Image: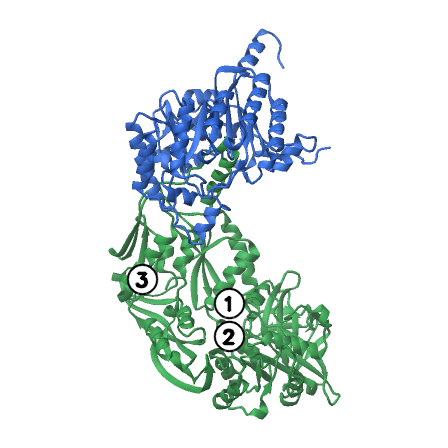
Amino acid sequence: MNQNLIRNFCIIAHIDHGKSTLADRLIDIAGTMKRSKVTEQVMDSMELERERGITIKAKAVRLDYKNRAGEHFRLNLIDTPGHVDFSYEVSRTLVACEGAVLVIDATQGIQAQTLANIYIAMEHNLVVIPVINKIDLPGSEPERVMEEIKSVLGYNLSETFFISAKTGQGVGELVEAIVDRIPPPGGDLNLPTRALIFDSHYDDYKGVIAYVRVVDGRLEKGSKVRLMGEGTQMEVLELGYFAPDPTPAESLQAGEVGYIATGLKSVAECRVGDTVTVVSGGATEPLIGYDLPKPMVYAGIYPTQADDYADLREAIEKLNLNDASLTFEPEASPILGQGFRCGFLGLLHLDIVVERLEREFGLSLVVTIPGVKFMVTKTSGEISDVTSPVDFPDPSEIAKIEEPWVRISVVTPSNFIGALMEVMQEFEGVYKHTEYLGQFTALGETGQRVQLEYEMPLRSMLTTFYDYLKSRSRGYASLDHELLGYREAKLVKLDVLVNDVKVDAFSRIIPPEKAHDIGKAVVSKLKDSIPRQLFKVPLQAAIGGRIVAREDISARRKDVLSKCYGGDITRKRKLLEKQKEGKKKMKMIGKVEVPKEAFLSIMKLG
Amino acid sequence: MGCGALSVIINWNMAANISLYIHIPFCIRKCSYCSFVSYSGRQDAMEQYSQALTREIIQRVDNRMLKSVYFGGGTPSLLPADHISRLLECIGTHLPQNREIEISLEANPGTINHKHLYAMLSSGVNRLSIGLQSLDDGELGVLGRLHSSAEGLNAVAYARGVGFKNINLDLIYGIPGQTLPSWQYTLEGVLSLEPEHLSLYGLSLESGTAMMEKIEAGELPTIDPDVSAEQYELAEKILAAKGYRHYEISNWAKPGFECRHNMVYWKNEEYIGVGAGACSHIGGHRFLNTSSLEKYIDAFTGNGAAVESDETISPEMAAAEAAILALRLEEGVEISSYNNDYKTDILSVNSKEIKELESYGLIENNGVNIKLTPRGRLLGNEVFWRFLPASSAQNDTNQVAMERE
């Protein structure tokens, strides 16, 4: 294929702004697939992605397009994850493209994550085509959003497209613009081979499949190749492109996008961001700096039933083949038994992993309170990373604690500024900056849209922060964050005792001045979620030996005793059997039966 | 089948006792808490139903001595007196009867008068169980009962008037909104009637009942188990002072007036149940009849079968059920006779459970009996489920084919 007739691009959009629908429409227009063969939203192939309306793993589709001048183009549409947890993957995807279609919802306008992604696109010199989507909706305000695009991003009306991905309106013009405005890929066919891995997944039959953008030279079936970052060597067992099903080919050359089947056993050996080159006569410089996305959030994952530990191990290992950013190591808890301490890119990543483990592997899990990685310097001078409250040293041994901070950007209508500033303060945020984005109309009022910048401990963000942000702004505020680095902190460990048994899974690291409030909230939540037992159960929150909050669950006095009517003992027995089965689903803390919901309720607590 | 004198004697002994339960599934209106097999507005089917009952009785009886008959419902007092007498006549001709036979009938105060009661007494009913439930009209309304407290009191007076010497009164506690004083008022009012027997049932919420729906919709307050516990304890105190023996979790009687029919259930003995939704326990099986009125009537006019499920009770399960039932009784499990009857050793089979339950103060074990403590009587289910066999779901239940050729 003539390199000049190739266009590599991606779509950037905030969640629900219509990226997947637009991708479907583009596929329609290019006619790569017969519509009947295609389920709605081709690009989101995981069930979970479709349900959550987000894209977890990037995919690439090759579209053949004949433009109005009659020329045949090859468009490679590379899908990007829309969530900040996966910003590393987004940035690698953008590097594989020459252009980006920026989709903005005509009913909502620019959101915090849109800004974050557009900055990355600009950083990598991508040609950006702004698109205002959903113009068919009654609540849409394309003019207002255009104003915002102009004042915040600096694009003109003439550069911007007004479309409805749902009805297809304006999409034809957009495709023409993709061909006209986005430059063909650079790169040199005659230079030593260099290809960027922008995604990978594990396939049971072919091993790891890497999604690549060939920048220089070519990749051929059977080539011996090397990954410049990881150092892995392998043979290209198969290569090809997606249309959207994998279609094998003989080679991929400079400018092209496709996949290679590596036969590798784990995506950890073949990570996003690495550069592929050939073993003999290979390149010396990688395409971009290769670094690994680091876990930001940690939590313990345990099976509800101790017997399921082996299954959980197998499930996590299997998931890890496909998700190298998930880290895990065995952990033992006196209460929860054998489990794993896992690291995640963010809370959404955690949610997705837990949901996949439960859904795809049929496991019932208990997940501990998510936390960050603290850096603790002991009085002995020893520095250690602490990802679990259990490992938090005794206060007398601590010389210094450091914790990660993030920069937060919130885009909101100005009438919620006051309420949101309060939320930020409650969650230990430090104010930095306000920027006015432009006019907007919502709920019949005209106001300003504002971007607020704060800095706050990541720890604070992992609790109910997002829920508050949404509820105090009636759902209007959007959030983006990026890691700033470690700062010194004053923190203590809050322990929770159920019937005088310390429950490590409920421990959390908090600022001392919040101990009383959080302690009270925890014990009262537990009181609501642990059913009354056959004996009195004291619930206590403590800092070291000091009790900061206490509630008692009084002993159960009476259950419902039905008569065995007319001698129907079977009916009565079945009720007892049900009661007995119910006990099996409980976690035992000492003698106390604790339902899984109690763990969930504490995890969700601020 | 054995032969020789010895086996004949054994068979005769085995045949000595059987009880008969007759289900009358008709009601004028279904009570708000009721999840039993009952139909309102189907009195048109009574005649056919009685005939079907007669046929089922003839079909199922053997030569065992009949010890008790119990008309339960539904509302048995809704059945015309001549139906009752016809059924009892049929039973009299087909079953040998003990002279001491107990014949109970459940009556709803809204459905009885002197004449009706007299006719029933004359046809052989010698124990009347009246569903009084409460003496508070507000509570009767919540329960969806069709009678007032005054009608309840009258019903008892009528029954005494026509000559019933053995009367049980059913009461319900733990009614949404019922207080301790209002419960005390009902108890004291009822005791002034000097019933021979009292059944006090804690209201149990069953899914699908009108009351459950109202509570879920917030139209009625939820049942506070602590209030129920206090009401139960109050009843224990008051009834003991009046000379009633608390012989089963929910039942109190003057000495000698314990319900013989219900004792059959609690002692895990054999019984035949006839009628829609009725349950039988015979020869290590538990049979359950169809609960559909139509299917039941059809079964005895030539189409289909009345029995819908046949459960084989394993020896292990039989032992567990016997223990659970015996624990309801004041004397609890009599260890040596229990071990003998079920070829087991309860103290070793259930040693872990017994120890645990003792530690919670729910049972006491003196080596002769295992019985519930006063606290255990309030938390019976916590005791009972622990006596279920480890793999309790394996009991074999066969759905009997409905359309048998």
Which numbered marker is on residue A325?
1
Q: Which of the chains bears the disc numbered 3?
A: A
The answer to whether residue A539 is above or below residue B252 is below
Quadrant occupied by the C terminus of chain B = top right
Question: Which residue type does callout 1 highlight?
Answer: Ser
The answer to whether residue A578 is above or below residue B219 is above
Question: Which residue type does callout 2 highlight?
Answer: Tyr
Residue position marked by numbered label 2 in the rendering: A88
The answer to the question of whether label 1 and label 2 lie on touching residues, with beta carbons closer than 8 A, is yes
Residue position marked by numbered label 3 in the rendering: A518
Residue at the image position 34 percent from the left and 80 percent from the top: A431
Q: Dot 3: few (<14), some (14–19), or many (≥20) neighbours within 10 Å?
A: many
Q: Dot 2: few (<14), some (14–19), or many (≥20) neighbours within 10 Å?
A: some
Which numbered marker is on residue A244?
none
Q: Which of the chains bears the disc numbered 2?
A: A
Residue A211, x across and y down, in percent: 62, 73
Chain identifier matching the blue colour in the rendered picture: B
Q: How is the image coloured?
A: by chain
Q: Is residue B272 visible?
A: no
Tell which circle, 3 or 2, labels the residue nearer the N-terminal end. 2
